Image: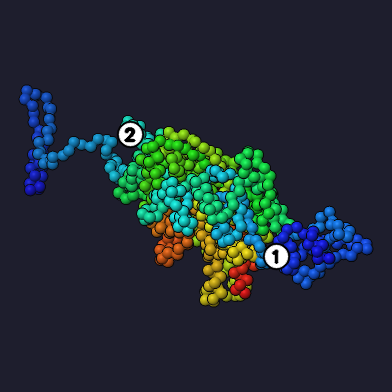
Amino acid sequence: MQSALLNRSCGAAFKATRPNACSRSVVVVRATAEAVVEKKERRLSPLERGGTLSGDQAAGKDAGEKARAMATGTTGAATLLQIVDGRFVDDRWIGGRWDLNQFKDSKGEVDWDKVIDAEVARRKLLEESPIPSINEDPVNFDTSEIPWWAWVRRFHLPEAEKLNGRAAMMGYVLALFVDSLTGAGLLEQQESFLGKVALHICVFAILLVRTSSDLDKYKGLIDEATFYDKQWNATWDGVKRPSEAESQ
Amino acid sequence: MAASFANTQVSGKVANRQVAQGRVAPFRATGVRKTAGTQIPSFYFAGVSVHQRVIAVSGARSVSRAVQTVFAVKDGAVLEGRKLRVAVIGGGPSGACAAETLAKGGVETFLIERKLDNCKPCGGAIPLCMVEEFDLPLEIIDRKVTKMKMISPSNREVDVGKTLSETEWIGMCRREVFDDYLRKRAEKLGASVLNGLFMRSEQQGTDGPFTIHYTSFADGSKMGTPATLEVDMIIGADGANSRIAKEIDAGEYDYAIAFQERIRIPEDKMKYYENLAEMYVGDDVSPDFYGWVFPKYDHVAVGTGTVVNKTAIKQYQQATRDRSKVKTEGGKIIRVEAHPIPEHPRPRRCKGRVALVGDAAGYVTKCSGEGIYFAAKSGRMCAEAIVEGSANGTKMAGEDAIRVYLDKWDRKYWATYKVLDILQKVFYRSNPAREAFVELCEDSYVQKMTFDSYLYKTVVPGNPLDDVKLLVRTVSSLIRSNALRSANSKSVNVSFGSKANEERVATA
């Protein structure tokens, strides 16, 4: 059918006619072929063509909240992390907890990093300007609502990367050292019991003692753990307890 | 003749009989003066030769200058014709309970209290076990608190008390009523209550009696009249600023300053506090303690305390008032008071025949600052040890008996004190730690353990599996809270070791 159309259009696509009462040679070429055109929408404006993304796909490529609000003229001025009249006010803080729906990203999943950021900011704000506790405004948000992997991804992984790096470097240096002393290569070191022990000590030491101030911290902790005991036993300095004297 | 000479010089029938029966440990006079030509009488007491210092002898005429004879009685010796005399200095819970137990045990007891209507600044909370153990009538309890709210720095509120049964509560009482009841009870059982202020005491030798000098207000005058009292043993129950402790060089202790304002609030606001007490934690309220709102009989007490930064106590009080501002709106301050709270026992809790009990000894728990129950219980235990060591007042008792009480006390309550110490060290360190604390208190296992150990004063080991789960929850809560602390937070970290107060506070 299409070929028939083509033939017809080819055959009679253009018709040259001489308008009446016209002597000069003016040829009006008129396209008379009837091209079958599907009913189309009104054509897209220049703003919408040429690689423009729209809707979800454009999300995240907008300007910030404030700029967008100004451009669209909406004063839905988002109140964020403010203390108004002695109460904590935020658009996303509803009923004493963070409304997780408002933290959803383009895919519809809650962006836990943003939730963590919001809670950090809230706590800092309340630390700096404490507000009275109001019965009508209870705080119901529990940090265990944020899943464990969000915490790990946000806080542990960067630290873990550093620590792994340190452990690897220390381990390599120690292995070289042991090799130079005993002539045992890396694999041989692993097979001996002492080698395994040394490896474990190295790794755990890196975990526990991250900086030199950590050593002071541990000394302080030991002091704290034993100080109270010492204070209680002060009255028994040089004197045996009756219960101990009996058992002897 | 020599024997009769000794008899005339010694005053007091008792000493006579003691000397005659040769059961008195003789007082060795230092420096016996040998007057030429005079025979120095020497007597044999219990087979030991002794020289008595004699200044002059002239026939039958007695000597006017003093012959030093001392009625020293060794520990364990039977007291002839009299009961053991014990003075209890201070008539609060510890003193009154000590006096009561002593009097019941047959010891002659003197209870010296400087202010019989004293209204000691105090939270006034007594645990349930105290009512039973000390037979307290329910009339002296103003309120039964069954709900305790803990409020974190970010205003997260947790209602602790969900696990309490109907018969479990924390009693709130007025100290003046409470102390008075206990004193009257001691008096009824035979203790003599003396209204006086202890000034100083002297002991006549290491085994001799004590002479207590005090200002007696018995005549009702403001100035009082000096008086003395002779006793064999002293129990120091005179509180945090104990004079007895100073007398025996018991040593210093760290103490918190507790500051409290009593506020009368409108009826509707008072309804909220009917059986509810609040605990505010946070840097603003106290760096190492907590702020509280405790209901009294017709008003509330709003207060806070601190160890490391006592000079800023008014700021902390203001912060506490601010945090409870809305709930205590329209209130009128009717009284402002402050008092020290010991943080740990004194280095020396006894010396010779002097013992310390209660706040004077420093028996206040950490974390909660609870002292009334332990004061009363220590007074009772000390008295029991003395009664036993003196065989119901018939023999002399001394340091050995007191050390029996100290040992029993340490063994019985060490676990309780240590657990509360650990709680304070872990959860009062910083704002994140306090947030974690409040978060953990939401759990009913925690609430049950806390209240069981508070109300019944026993560290009850729970189900091991639940304990492990609790440990995991604690660690994860602490990790989360610390992670949520802003990098440029200005809150402080407090440590609880042996460093000086200034060094214990550090910004994060």
- Confirm whether residue B14 shows in the render: yes
Disc 1 marks which amino acid?
Lys
Residues flagged by tags 2 and 1 on a common chain: no
- Confirm whether residue B443 shows in the render: no
Residue at 44% from the left image edge and 35% from the top image edge: B331
Question: The numbered mark 2 sits on a residue in which chain?
Answer: A
Front-most of residues A65 and B261: B261
Residue at 36% from the left image edge and 47% from the top image edge: A140
Which residue is identified by label 2? A76
Give the number of the mark in front: 2 or 1. Answer: 1
SS class, disc 2:
loop
SS class, disc 1:
loop
Residue at 41% from the left image edge and 39% from the top image edge: B327
Q: How is the image coloured?
A: rainbow
Image mark for residue B406: none
On the image, the x and y values in percent for residue A87 come to 40, 37
Front-most of residues A92 and A51: A92
Question: The numbered mark 1 sits on a residue in which chain?
Answer: B
Mark 2–mark 1 Cα distance, whole angstroms, equals 89 Å
Q: How many marks?
A: 2
- Vertically, is B354 above or below A241? above
Disc 2 marks which amino acid?
Gly
Image check: B90 left or right of B154? right
Picture quadrant where residue B222 is located: top right
Which residue is identified by label 1? B74
Image check: B349 left or right of A139? right
Looking at this view, name the residue that lies furthest to the front. B60
